[in-house]
Amino acid sequence: MFTRVNPNMVPDLVAEIAQTQQQLNQADQEIASGRTINQPSDNPAGTAALILNHAAQSQADTFQMNTSNLQDRLQTADSALNAAVTAVNQAISLGVEAGNSDLSDSDRQAIVSQLSGIQQQLVSIGNTSYSGTYLFAGSAVETQPFTLDATAAAGVTYNGNNATVSAEINNGDSVATNVPGSQLFLNSSGSLFGSLQRMITAIQSNSGIAAASTAFGAAATEFDSQRVAYGSTLTQLQSTNTLLSAEQTQLSTQENTIDAADLAQATSTFSQASISYQSLIEAESEILKLPNLLTYLQ
Amino acid sequence: MSLGSSLSIAVQAMLTDQGALAVTSNNIANVNTPGYTREVANLEEAPPVRFGNQSYGGGVELSGIQSIRDNILQLRLNQETQTQGKLNTFTNGMNQIQTVFNEDAGTGLQSLLSNFFNSFQTLASDPTNSGDRQAIIGAAQSLASGFNQTATTLVQQQQNADQGVVQTVQQINQITAQIANLNGEISTTAGAGLNTNSFEDQRDQLITQLSGLIDVQTIPANGNTVNLTTNNGAQLVVGNQSFNLQTGANSTTSFQDVYAEGTDITASIQSGTLAGDLQLRDQEIPQIQNNLDTLAYNLENSVNTQNAAGYDLNGSAGGSIFAAPASVTGAALNMSVSITDPNLIAASGDGTAGSNTNATALANLQSQNIVSGQNPIAYYSGIVSQIGNDTETASSQLTGGNLLVQQLNDQIGAASGVSLDEEGANLILYQNAYTAASRVASIVQSLYQTAIAMVGTTTG
């Protein structure tokens, strides 16, 4: 008793060849794209993870670009305030000199002239702009913050506001991106413009020069302590930059873990499938040529 | 026992062998005919004849031509073919849908969503920057476009499935008509006592073909006919009569419903290509559309609400960025940007030009749970992985099903397939038997001549 088998072997062979071809195509796709996930059905959970990963990378890229732009902006502010410190130191020297009782009226007038020049310089620095907006106007960035005003007690009018603006530089991480001009130059604990004007007036009237000088010195110290914020923010931005780079590397690695094709394996699979395909084709052609009993009957 | 009996036995043997040779020849001719079941000549000893005190064998006769058919295997094949038909159609449809959710291929909404939200983040670091503001509008328009196109593709796929339903129903009707016809032929032929093998082969082929299109129950009836109904009992073929399925537009969806004798059977079709198209059109795609619409609807509303909470560059309270969606349904297809003036982006939290708190809030919507308890990107990833899952599941079931069909075909072939070796051997057998019988006839003829010669004519 024997088991009869399907005399027609062709459909099975055809099916096997089709299956091998599919393996070939799959391996080929992986090699060509370098990825194991070439459509969602290749790895549904991996596809979801990949979407989240790409979104995170995109966000990190944006944060990094923004941080870089902020660095430029704050660097400009910091440099401007550095120039202000130079001018302020000059004013301090002039104030000391003016306290010398040997000076003539015209000598004192000369000093007042120089101090007025420094006052204008400081106004100009206070009005520094970057990319079309004022750096020291609080959040009123389209309004010029300082104007010389002979009628004002401090010699200037402040047209900005007292707001501090924060910017997000990474997930859950913000920095203050400005110190308001009022806080820098017109601080209630020591007003730079206010005490400068007082010194000018004192020298002009030759009265209370020493006290005015001392007050200006104190205001200069206050100014110095206010402007430090820019330097420390710049430092924070730099380290955030570094952190973001590290995050991007990590996200990149994660992406590869999810999606990168193992090229060695894919190539090997491709080779095997190729050989298999070749063998099947050869086998099929041999089988189709096999004679049957009828061919021998004469 | 007479010479005549021997002669007639020999002649009958020759006729029988001729018949068996004809069967063999038919098998060989049909070696490649799809659905052909091999025939076997049943040779039986003819009833014995009494002659005097002896009982002599009556020779051989061809009692029938039997086709080797396994009805159980055929039934199983039909069942698996139904499942295969449904999965095949469904998988093909899903593969096409996948192509619009493929980030790697440049389609898909993730990069558009990310760009949109991140463009607010960029503005937040420089709120008056007109280039950044314009970029937001550009990103919003790209996002709306992406939603529109994805939604349009889904509608197109639905329409394709709908057309598939109409075409399949037409095919079904053609096949049931043919089957009914064959039932009639079989009934008539069997009634006349003739062999119905070839009609049955054709009918089995058609039933298998029909199984690929719709779920089919086979009920054997009298006269060797077969009645067909759907799994739910809708009649397809009764005897020599076939019952056409009809399609008619649904009043709500305007897609084609399927009717059998006036009853709407659309929801009760379980298998075959028809079920595959219906599942795509009526269940899978609507679910994807609903999810996409939910995402669009909630995103638009949240963005609009947040923008309205801030102040634009003119110092006025913010308005809407997207055209307010009328309802969840259609939100993706109709998504559009309602502003062109970049100044209307409400970046400011208090009306001052340099304030950025509202721009930051807008950017951070991407991580807020504003869509059914998830953030928009996570929700979108859920949509895509669901599509991937459904496709992958159907695809691997199809692979298994194909294997099963292949195995069943092998088993059917083992029982019913023509082996040229076997038929070759049979040719030799019957040829030799025929030759031997003709030798007997020839010898009987010479015996007759001897007997006649014995009686002879005498010339007187």
Image: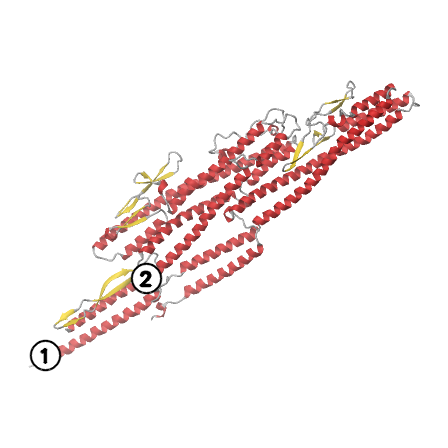
Q: Residue B229 in the image: x percent, y percent?
A: 30, 46
**Residue B182, how many percent across, how many down?**
27, 51
* Quadrant of the image occupied by residue A204: top right
Q: Which mark is residue B264?
A: none
Q: Which residue is drawn at 73% across and 36% down?
A: A232
Numbered tag placed on residue B29 in the rendering: 2
For residue B159, say whether it is visible: no
Q: Which of B304 and A251 is in front in this view?
A: A251
Helix, strand or loop status at disc 2: helix
Q: Could you say whether the residue bearing mark 1 is in a helix, strand or loop?
A: loop
Task: Residue type at mark 2: give it.
Answer: Ala
Mark 2 neighbour class, 10 Å CA radius: few under 14, some 14 to 19, many 20 or more: few
Q: Which residue lies furthest to the front in this view?
A: A189
Q: Which disc number belongs to residue B457? A: 1
Q: Quadrant of residue B156?
A: top left
Determine whether, in the image, residue A189 is placed left or right of residue B400: right
Image mark 1: chain: B
Residues packed near mark 1 inside 10 Å, few (<14), some (14 to 19) or many (20 plus): few
In front here: B394 or B257?
A: B394
In the displayed structure, would residue B154 be above or below residue B393? above
Q: Nearer the viewer, residue B388 or A34?
A: B388
Q: Mark 2 lies on which chain?
A: B
Q: Which residue is drawn at 24% across and 62% down?
A: B64
Amino acid type assigned to the residue bearing label 1 in the image: Thr
